[in-house]
Every structure is written in structure tokens, then in C-alpha cells.
Image: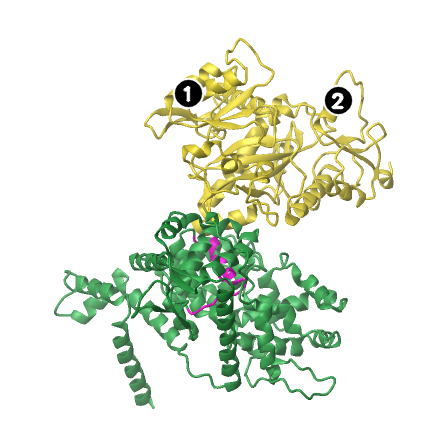
Chain colours: A green, B yellow
Amino acid sequence: MENIKEETIHHTAMKLAEEIKNLSIYKSFYSDVQKLVSSPSVKKEDFKQTLQQAMKEKGLDTKLRNTVFHWVRTQNKQNKLDPLTSLSKASAQWEKRIHKSLNSMCSDLETSLAKIRSQSEQEELADKWNELSTYSLDLSKYRPVYAPKDFLDVLLTLSGYVPFTKEDEPKWEFAHLPLQVKTLDQLRKIYQEWANGEPLLGVNPNMPSTVPGFATLEAERIGLGERVAVLGYAPVIQEYLKKGSPQCLRAKLWSQVLGADVKQQQIIYFNQLKKNVLEVDLMIDKLIFKDVQLTASNDDQYFVFEDLLYQVMLCFSRDGEAARAAGASALRVAVKGRHAPDCLIAFPPSGVIPFHGFTMYATPFCYLYDDPVQLYFMFRAFYMRYWHRLHYISTHPQGIVSLCLLYERLLEANEPLLWIHFRNININPIRVVFKWLMRAFSGHLPPDQLLLLWDAILGYDCLEILPLLALAILSFRKENIFQVNTLQNVDAVLADLSTISVIPLLQLALMKS
Amino acid sequence: MDKGRVTYCTDLEKSVIISNFERRGWIQVGPDDEWNFYWSFTQNCRNIFSIENGYRMSDNQIINHFPNHYELSRKDLLVKNIKRYRKELEREGNPLSEKTEIMLPNGQAVTRYLHLDFIPVTYVLPADYNMFVEEYRKSPQSTWIMKPCGKSQGAGIFLINKLSKLKKWSREAKTPLHPQISSKESYVISRYIDNPLLIGGKKFDLRLYVLVTSFRPLKAYLFQHGFCRFCTVKYDTSVTELDNMYVHLTNVSVQKHGGDYNNLHGGKMSIQNFRLYLEGTRGRSVTEKLFADMHWLIVHSLKAVAPVMANDRHCFECYGYDIIIDKTLKPWLVEVNASPSLQSTTHNDRILKYKLIDNIVSVVVPPDGIPDARWNKIPSNEALGDFDVLIDEELIEKDEAPLRGNKFNRYRS
């Protein structure tokens, strides 16, 4: 038994060693090690020991560990063929619809999906790059391709709608899908620290600390967080984030845990994306501009950052690496003005057609980074690990379909009266929370609360907290919900989340009463 | 007096004010009737206190202005009072008045107060014209901002960066800049803060609300909800932009007519979000220092005018403090408004102003709900609402400064 285990580890280590050679950090890492070897601290007689020791001192040890950590995390995300054919069929159909819509928008507006930008346009865009809110475009005829509502309608058809049903049988339950989701008790095992009632930063930062030398919990967390940040070891940071991060340390900790640090290489990459934006005009650019204008620019929490957001969202659309995450089939279009053989490009290179509100996946990072490159890589890291799951149809346990099902199950099991109430007033309960789930609450919670929620997503590396929070909010406001009986009025009860304290609400739900 | 018969009078017919009074069951009366609580225009308040009037307020009457609030709210008098305050501290040998040498960008060294340098160098024109020219010559590349003393809402303000422009203006305004000839319209000219802190590339100023219920002893309260007001157009330092007031001025009245003004957010960002942003991007200690410096600035501006304010027990006043922060995270006092606008530009704004009035009333009215000029003016924690105690000299004196609300312990000395 031991032998098999050892062999597997050996096998993985060999594979890892090979794959590391292909990673972008390899070259500089290898040369750093070479420099160390030629230094006096590494001795020929005791090569292994002294090299390992020297690597530890120079932080190369941590770097290697972090690389392994990130590699292991991405391995689990390998896209296998989706086992549920109804879902994969629905997914393909939905993508086809989006592409069709784009094409017809394009022909209606008599423009091309992709074309080379004129020299003067390139210059103007480059000139105004840092203040694209002043770049005037006529966007009046452009409309977002789809909104969360449209996506929800597609998801609702997934439930294997059976045309002949009895009067009282709901036609829309996700429960009809053969997907496994957790129960509240199982969630408690995952969010163990919360369920045990351990002190969380988001509950009461001023509560007295149990650790000598610190007056408050907040001071204690800052002290611990600074040490964790210096150590720089990603799994430790992830563990730390479970109990919430002080705002002053978030920028550093988040980028370390996702491996989104910005070095010269990243700056060059970003500038290449910018170059792509300047050179080729994709119709999507207008949709991006429109989305920033409609969402971030109108939001009193984020309007200040609009110029940063234009840059980030435009560059993101040109980033082929993002396409790997979603595994979506991108449209291939001809670039007007370019000749074969390389006149075809993926439209867009990121494989992501933005929908209404897509910008909101990026807006909260503006409270952590004021440099566009850092902002970009942080947003991209989050998108590639989490956000893409919220707008693609799949059977993944963290995907939006599973999250909807989880929400449904949690509501039915833990708030049965609410569940019945929704049935009685003929409202599908997913309708009132879907936009929260699809946007991971961005734009619905104030930034300080949102950042605490996203700490938890990072700390536990899972999105299941989103439907749990939706349930907790509904539960908190249930008395008001019982009083109303139209979708409009339920929406009104839930419209303003500005007074919600997210972490105490969640902890309450997770602690056994 | 019976709680059910409290009366109010208001010169400002706005729902944000009236609803707060009606909610308490107060009855509206006219200014000539027996009012207990008067939300007045500054002019009417001055009239009540004028000697010719002969009006004596009863113990159960309180009013929302101090009769000579202009010592704080007129730009020239504010500057005069602060300068006088600093000189007095210097004469006393108070360590607060310590001075230091600062290097200007052009290499020139100037002397500034180390702890009390919170207003940009300012001169009153035409009286201080010669002093201004002397200072101007120390850094001739600098920009200065001219503001009429008596106006508000950004009216009549303009920038100059050449002495010749000032002379040109004085010729055109038919106001000779000769010290001997006094003019009705005086101006202040201040060193323009040309390196403001930008967020998202946009310039902003801060509006903070400060309630004062007494000047001697000083009792001041800071409202937790302030906001940053952003320019709708991108900040640009090129000379051609000097004349474009939509870029530099952040007064909402001026911004409202700029093409890109937005009604959903009104160009306003809450001070809580500002703090969150600063802490997230710059760290905790510089953020805490900035906020401490702003509180310090407010307290000392109030201490500066305290000796000259008519400290009538019937009065309280809510000031709108306008502060600009520069790139080094140093706050500068731009102006103090004695009648901060209660107009609401957005939904959030309406809520904020409603809360502000509500908390003002609960702070200034004694616990039994009946306005009384004789009460001890020590509001309970609950009555404070969303106000924090900025300074209460009476409590400091008694060494009873409360733990909650008085986070600003620097003023105990």
C-alpha cells in the first residue's frame, strides 16, 4: 500500500518537475538558483543541504512551494467532457444564440465584428488611454447582448421541464437535475471555523483580543497578517483569509494567494494586450464601453474608478489566457483589413462575451489597487478561478447551476415556511436572488462588506458561500417577505442591502442553534 | 413646559427639515410667534440678535446660528482669526506654535508652522496686497486662487498664475488694489493647491459636517457621514484649463451644470468608502494620520475663533467644512460654511441630510425633548446618533471625557 502511494507521489513529482519547466517563471527561477550555486554559501561537499538552506534564506524555497501550490490547484480544474448531456447541449445552444445575436447586431449596425483601427483612431485612443471616459463614442444603438435575467431564463429551462404536470407541481425546480449539492450540515463541516463560533474579523473588529499584546481582534489580525504576508507562503495565507483580512493587508494577501503578483513580465504582457486593443477594433469594445457606462459609472461606490475599469475590461477581452479557464468555444472571425493567413482571430480572444454587469466582477478591486496592471491581474486571477463559473452552464459543483440548486435545497430544508410562501404566491425563489449569485454580490453589497465576503471565497476556495448568504438574507428579512405577494414587492424588500452585516449573518446561519 | 407643545419655526421650507420636526410632534409657527426651535437663515438670526431689535429670547428658545458666525464663515475673517490665534500661541511660547523650515519646489526656503499649517498662504485684498506680492515673488511660477469674501457656491472665483493677470482683473473690476482705498467687495487670494490627491485621476474635495453647541467651553461634534465631491471632468494642469471652472472647482453648484454631471451619484463618494480606498491602497497608518490631521484642523480652527464668537447659550450651529487633501496626504482647510446646503442631489444624499438634521436636533435638545438654553449640553451616547464627540472642553476640564465618541484624545492637553 505504502509503495503504491510512494509511487504515485513520485510520479506526480516527475510530472510536476517537467511541467514547471514550461511555466513562465521557470527561466528566472532557474537563473536565481544558478546564481546561488555559484555563491560561497553553497558547498560542493554538501551540495543538497547547503543548496536547500541557501534557497530557504533567499526566499526561493517559498517561491517553489507557492508554484507547486498554484499548480496543484489548477490541476483540479482540468476541463473534462461534461457528463450531463442535457447541460452541455443547453450550453452549446446558449453560446450559439449569443453568437447569432452578435452577428445580427453587427449587420444591423453595418459594422464589422473585427477590423483594423485607422491610424488616427489608434492615436486618439492611445492619447486618451488613461481617461477613456472622455473618449466619445456613439453607443446609442448598442445594447448589451444579454443580462442576468436572460441567462436565468435559460437555466430555468434546464430543469427538464416536463410538459404534462399536475397543477401543484412546480415546473421550474433545479431539483429535477441529477446534481449533488451539500446540505447545511455539510457546509458547516467546510466552514468549520465559522460554525465553531471562532472570532471573525467581520463580526466585531473591536472585540478584545484573547492574544496577549493586542488590545483588539483587529490589532491581533493585523499583527498576524503582517507576519503571514512577510512569509509569503500561499497556503498559509489562504488559511489566514478564512477569518477575514484587515483592509490594509488585503491587496498584498490576495495577490499572493492567487499568484497574481505583478513583475516586469506582467507589465510587458499587459502592454501587449493594450497594443492589441489599439490595433484591432472589435465590436465588443463598444459593448465594453457601454457596460462600464451603464454600471460602474452610475454607481456611487465605483464611478470614481471608471477610467481604470475601461483599461482593465478592454485589455481583458484580448487576453487568450482567460479563454483557457472558461473552455468556451470562441467565435472565429475575419479581421477586416488584414489578409490571410492570419486574418482570423478568436472573437474575442478572451472567449468571453460580456453581458450587462460584467464590469462589476472587476469593480471591487479598485478599492485595493490603484495601478491598472495590478488591478488587471487580480481581476483576471479571480475570473479564471471563480467568476467564469458564474456565467457558464456546466455540472461543476461550483458552477452557477449547482449554486442555484444549492440555494433551492437550502431554502426548502431550512426555511420551509418561506419556501411554501413562494410557492403560494407563485414566485420562483431563485428569481429574487439570482442577480446576487451571478455577480457574487458585487454592486449589491457595499464594498467593505463585499470584500469580507470575497475574503471567505478565497479562504475556503469555494463559491458555495454565495447561495448560503442569499439564504441568510432571505431568512433575515422573512417577516417582510411574508407580508408581500408580488415579485416586485419581494424585490423591493430585498433591494437595499446596505445595512446587512454579512459575516455575522453567515456565522449565525452556520452555527448550530 | 409640556413636551407635546414644542413649537418650531423654519425659514427653509424643505421636507428634509420639516419632516424631522413633525416626526417629533412639534407644531409649526411663524417667526413672530412663540417658537422653541428656529431653523433660520443667517440674516434673520443676525436680526434677532441686533441691538435695535430688542428681542430677548426666552430660556426655551434655541436657534441654529451664532450671531457672528461670519468670524468662521467669511474667508477673510477666518484667515484673520487663524493668523491671530497662531501669533497668540507663539507669544505664549506654546509648543503648538512651533515653526519649521520648508523647502519650496523651486529651492526657496520658507517658514511655516509645524502643527498649525492647515490653511494655504492667504492674503486679504486689497489690504494685504503688498505682503501678497512679496510672497508671490518667492515662487513666481505658482498659481493663486482669488475668492470673493462674501460669496458662496463657487461664484466669482478664478485662478491666476501671473501677477499681470491680477493687475488686469483689478483694472477690469474697477477695484484699485491700493491699500488706502477700501472697497466693499474684498477678496482673499490663496496659494492654490496644485498637487491635489487624485482618485481614479479625478480631483475632489471633502465635505465634513461639524456641529458646535458652545464655543466657550468648546463643544464640537463631527458627523460620521461626510463625502468627497468629485470634478466631473478629468483634472488637467495645462494652462489652458485654468479658465475651465469645471475642472478645478468642486462645488456641486458649479459641477451640476457641467456636461457630465450624473444624477445617480452626483459625483459624491462617501467618506467611509474614501477611507476604505485609502487604507486598501496606501495602508493603515497614513490613513489614520490623515483623518487625525483633519480632526486636528477642525478643532484648531474652532479654537481660533472661540475668543471672538458671541457664545450665546441659545445658539448652536452646524458647519460644512470644505477640505482639500494634497498628494502628500496633507489636508488643507478651504472654507467653512455656516449654512451648508440641505439640497439633495441624489437619493443617498437625501438620506444623509435627513439623518444629519435628525441627529442635530437630538444633540441640541435636552433629554426631556424640550428646547432649553440652560441645560448642561452633555448629550448621551444615544442622543449623539451618528455624531462623534470631536472635543468637549468642559468634560476634559472635569476629566470626564467619555470613552465612546471621544476618540480624539489629542485635545486633552
Residue A248's disc is none
Residue extent of the magenta highlight: A351-369
Q: Quadrant of residue B2?
A: top right
Q: Residue furthest top?
A: B180
Q: Residues within 10 Å of mark 1 (few under 14, many from 20)?
A: some
Is A365 within the magenta? yes
Q: In the figure, is residue A276 to the left or right of B204? A: left
Q: Residue B376 versus residue B40: which sits nearer the camera?
A: B40
Q: Nearer the viewer, residue A178 or A406?
A: A178
Asked if residue A114 lies in the magenta stretch, the reply is: no
Across and down, in percent, residue A89 comes to 51, 83
Q: Quadrant of the rendered structure where residue B59 is? A: top right
Q: Secondary structure at mark 1?
A: helix
x then y, percent, for residue A299: 57, 53
Residue position marked by numbered label 2 in the rendering: B47
Whether residue B413 is visible here, answered yes or no, is no
Query: Visible in this render: residue B370?
Result: yes
Residue under pointer 1: B135
Q: What is the three-letter code of the residue carrying label 1?
A: Glu
Give the mark nearer the N terminus: 1 vs 2: 2
